Image (cartoon, coloured by chain):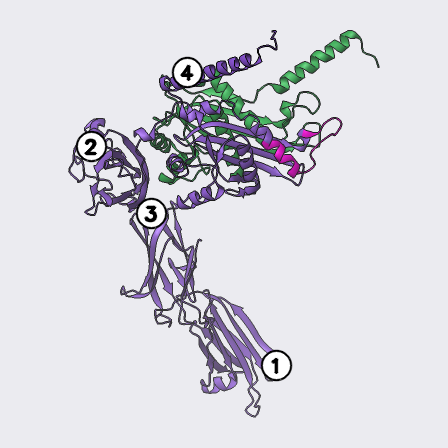
Chain colours: A green, B purple
């Protein structure tokens, strides 16, 4: 079957649009609850992510990779995980078990001497069938909050859900097959959004 | 350039001379450069690194993968780094009680630098590792500077066979063992080229210059009691583990809600102690001094209860307790040490007794079930149940710690194991919540274990026997009565039943003085509690003649097991 030139061009445009739609980060929802405080002191602590998944190991993986992506930006003074865990022991909280309340956030912020805390919640994580295939691809739903340590108030909150096959470019190329890479990408997308909101720029100053 | 062969020696010596001059000049210039310009020794020397055991989260928290750890050793050595020995790292972990992989706190990072002399630590986490399905491997590496605990490089990667499938299938890895070295190399391929610069860039703090802020380590902490009634005292004892060599002792304050108490140091200097009243209900004890109270507390050196801020009414609530440390240099730290609860409300319990209610009282003959229920689902510290007779004497009781039993039963026995007297008894249940608030509830029950009395009258009438069945005890209603009369051959002469007494019967009968045949009878009474009386009459005829000879055989369904009088089912 031979298509006419117009039909071929139309199909190409349609395919490109489909690809563009697939690659856009529509699942990222960013909410600004309050403005960033007028300060450029950027010592941060990423608190162990609470999780609603069954595996604590997976929660630790998501936490470590998010922290690694943040450290790679080299824009902040990040508190070491060991210091954060020490603070948790001091207030008798079990890491990865639950969300700290406002008072606990204030105490953690004070103890760790940070301006901001990043708290996360892993809502869903696992594997599901790739669209149009019998192969499994990872998915992740993550909620990350930026908290002002002094008040315990949430400044920003970001919800993001991604599945490995959403990164497909052509055929199977581009599909993210490992949860490790998916966590990296989800973390990068969240941090990119935060950067576009001025968070990182403010710290670089 | 053109040389003639006539002056070979001159040329040779000329070049040697020039070389010597230029070499000496270079050495002199280098020496001058070294004198004038200080060399950054740190950048010139070889960086040393400690490769911590890689944590394999695919096998569970704190699982180690030494194969990949050693692979990383080799990769670091290939990059020209000086590697700390594996045994030294393990010894350090043991001596410093490092029980977790993949992270260290800043204090231990500084110690690592001090003890092993390393500039960097490489932490690794295996994020996924699947050999069964499609081989998959994930790794995250993190490089930390030991001088200030700054993470100077990280990289993460994942790889599965699906990522490695080439068009022609050439050089594809087939197993996990072939896959993971590819990924490790890929992750390390982004190892920073400017490592020297990163190692030597500005420190977050310089611990050698005393810039490291003091850290708070709570060695022991005891906050008791955790549940109090208004007006009761709460005590907090804290033992700190501070680096006394380096820092002066801090002032210790205990912050409760928005009040601040200066803690008193014990005579041996090891502990700090503060006590306060959980919550005062009297007005005017606390002065409202605004939020300056913290500063006020800090300047008051009296080791005693301190007047703090009180805002709003005192209510039952959970009060957070925090520790404030203030060093002479002005540094201040806050650490949450626990909560205590002020509770003035006693728990609310309901006592449900299962059984038949007669004349407004639960009445039983063998056992009753007692079902205590807590309305506000509050945990109990202990409970007690007593059974008192009409004079108030305790005939049976029990008590226990923790929550109330879900169900209790009493078999009408006393402490000695024998049945108590028939009568009215009072069940008194007491409970105490964790703050010590007491609640009491009581219910009266009637213990009626005796079978119903039977009155049987048999009289001779002309050609008949007249029988009257009655009972004197009308307090407990009958469930049923039953009468059966047979002749000697087993022929049923009369059968009747009902639940109302007295009952009259006339049984036709031919009186014959020479006839010795018997007339047998049975009467059964059973009350609503299950008490039963059964009477078998061997010969009604003789009874009628003599109005005697009645043989009563009383039976009862009362239990005769040797089981305990009390038993309960715990909620746990």
| Highlighted range, magenta | B164-184
- Tell if the residue under mark 1 belongs to the same chain as the one under mark 3: yes
User: Which image quarter: residue B428?
Assistant: bottom left
Q: Which of labels 4 and 2 is toward the front?
A: 4
Gap between marks 4 and 1 measured at Cα: 143 Å
Mark 3 and mark 2 in contact (Cβ < 8 Å)?
Answer: no
Q: Which residue is mark 2?
A: B298
* Local crowd size for mark 3, using a 10 Å CA cut-off: few (<14), some (14–19), many (≥20): many
Q: Which residue is mark 4?
A: B29
Chain letter, disc 4 residue: B
Q: Secondary structure at mark 3?
A: loop
User: In the image, residue B62 lies at what x, y percent?
Assistant: 50, 42
Q: Which residue is mark 3?
A: B347
Gap between marks 4 and 2 measured at Cα: 62 Å
Q: Which of labels 4 and 3 is toward the front?
A: 4
User: Which image quarter: residue A103?
Assistant: top left
Q: Is residue A123 visible?
A: no
Residue lying at the far bottom of the rendered structure: B514
User: In the image, residue B44 lies at what x, y percent?
Assistant: 44, 25
Mark 1 and mark 4 in contact (Cβ < 8 Å)?
Answer: no
Q: Which residue is mark 1?
A: B490
Of the pair B562 and B160, the residue shown nearer to us? B160
Q: Earlier in the sequence, mark 4 or mark 2?
A: 4
At a point 74% along the width and 9% down the height, the residue shown is A9
Mark 2 and mark 1 in contact (Cβ < 8 Å)?
Answer: no
Of the pair B347 and B352, the residue shown nearer to us? B347
Asked whether B172 falls inside the magenta stretch, the response is yes
User: In the image, residue B108 lies at what x, y percent?
Assistant: 39, 37
Q: Which of labels 2 and 3 is toward the front?
A: 2
């Amino acid at each position: 079957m031979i298509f006419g030139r117009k039909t071929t061009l139309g199909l190409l445009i349609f395919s490109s649009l489909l690809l563009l739609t697939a690659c856009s980060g529509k699942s990222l929802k960013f909410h600004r609850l309050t403005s960033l405080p007028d300060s450029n002191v950027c010592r941060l602590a990423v608190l162990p992510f609470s999780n609603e998944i069954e595996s604590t190991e997976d929660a630790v993986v998501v936490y470590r990779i998010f922290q690694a992506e943040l450290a790679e930006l080299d824009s902040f003074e990040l508190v070491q995980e060991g210091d954060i865990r020490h603070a948790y022991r001091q207030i008798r909280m079990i890491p990865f078990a639950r969300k700290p309340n406002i008072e606990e956030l204030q105490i953690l912020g004070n103890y760790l001497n940070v301006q901001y805390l990043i708290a996360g919640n892993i809502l869903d994580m696992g594997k599901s069938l790739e669209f149009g295939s019998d192969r499994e691809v990872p998915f992740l739903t993550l909620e990350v909050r930026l908290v002002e340590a002094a008040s315990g108030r949430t400044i920003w909150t970001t919800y993001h859900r991604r599945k490995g096959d959403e990164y497909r470019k052509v055929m199977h190329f581009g599909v993210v097959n490992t949860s490790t890479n998916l966590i990296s990408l989800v973390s990068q997308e969240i941090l990119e959004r935060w950067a576009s909101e001025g968070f990182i720029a403010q710290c670089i100053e | 350039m053109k040389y003639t062969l006539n002056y070979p020696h001159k040329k040779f010596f000329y070049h040697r001379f020039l070389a010597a001059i230029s070499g000496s000049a270079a050495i002199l210039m280098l020496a001058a450069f070294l004198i004038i310009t200080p060399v950054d020794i740190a950048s010139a020397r070889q960086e040393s690194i400690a490769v911590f055991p890689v944590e394999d989260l695919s096998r569970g928290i704190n699982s180690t993968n030494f194969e990949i750890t050693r692979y990383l050793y080799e990769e670091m050595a290939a990059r020209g780094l000086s590697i700390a020995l594996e045994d030294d790292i393990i010894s350090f972990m043991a001596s410093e009680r490092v029980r977790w992989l993949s992270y260290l706190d800043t204090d231990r990072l500084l110690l690592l630098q001090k003890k092993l002399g390393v500039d960097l630590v490489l932490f690794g986490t295996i994020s996924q590792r699947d050999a069964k399905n499609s081989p998959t491997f994930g790794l995250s590496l993190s490089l930390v500077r030991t001088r200030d605990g700054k993470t100077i490089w990280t990289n993460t990667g994942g790889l599965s066979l699906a990522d490695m499938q080439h068009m022609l299938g050439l050089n594809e890895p087939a197993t996990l063992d072939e896959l993971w070295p590819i990924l490790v190399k890929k992750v390390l391929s982004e190892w920073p080229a400017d490592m020297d610069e990163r190692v030597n860039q500005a420190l977050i703090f310089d611990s050698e210059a005393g810039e490291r802020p003091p850290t708070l380590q709570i060695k022991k902490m005891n906050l008791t009691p955790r549940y109090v009634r208004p007006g009761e005292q709460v005590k907090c004892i804290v033992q700190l583990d501070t680096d006394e060599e380096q820092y002066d002792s801090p002032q210790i304050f205990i912050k409760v809600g928005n009040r601040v108490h200066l803690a008193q140091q014990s005579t041996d200097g090891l502990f700090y102690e503060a006590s306060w009243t959980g919550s005062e209900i009297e007005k005017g004890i606390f002065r409202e001094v605004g939020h300056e109270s913290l500063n006020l507390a800090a300047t008051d050196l009296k080791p005693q209860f301190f007047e703090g801020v009180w805002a709003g009414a005192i209510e039952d609530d959970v009060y957070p307790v925090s520790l404030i440390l203030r060093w002479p240099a002005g540094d201040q730290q806050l650490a949450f040490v626990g909560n205590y609860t002020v509770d003035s409300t006693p728990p609310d319990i309901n006592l449900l007794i299962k059984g038949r209610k007669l004349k407004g009282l639960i009445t039983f003959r063998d056992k009753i079930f007692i079902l205590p229920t807590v309305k506000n689902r509050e945990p109990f510290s202990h409970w007690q149940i007593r059974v008192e007779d009409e004079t108030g004497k305790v005939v049976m009781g029990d008590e226990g710690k923790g929550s109330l039993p879900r169900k209790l039963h009493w078999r009408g026995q006393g402490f000695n194991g024998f049945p108590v007297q028939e009568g009215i008894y009072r069940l008194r249940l007491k409970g105490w919540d964790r703050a010590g608030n007491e609640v009491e509830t009581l219910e009266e029950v009637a213990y009626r274990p005796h079978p119903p009395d039977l009155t049987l009258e048999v009289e001779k009438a002309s050609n008949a026997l007249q029988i009257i069945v009655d009972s004197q005890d009308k307090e407990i209603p009958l469930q049923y009565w039953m009468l059966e009369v047979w002749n000697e051959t087993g022929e049923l002469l009369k059968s009747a039943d009902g639940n109302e007494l007295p009952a009259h019967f006339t049984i036709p009968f031919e009186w014959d003085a020479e006839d010795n045949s018997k007339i047998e009878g049975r009467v059964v009474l059973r009350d609503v509690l299950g008490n039963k009386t059964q009477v078998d009459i061997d010969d009604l005829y003789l009874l009628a003649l003599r109005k005697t000879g009645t043989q009563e055989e009383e039976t009862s369904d009362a239990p005769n097991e040797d089981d305990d009088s009390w038993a309960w089912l715990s909620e746990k």
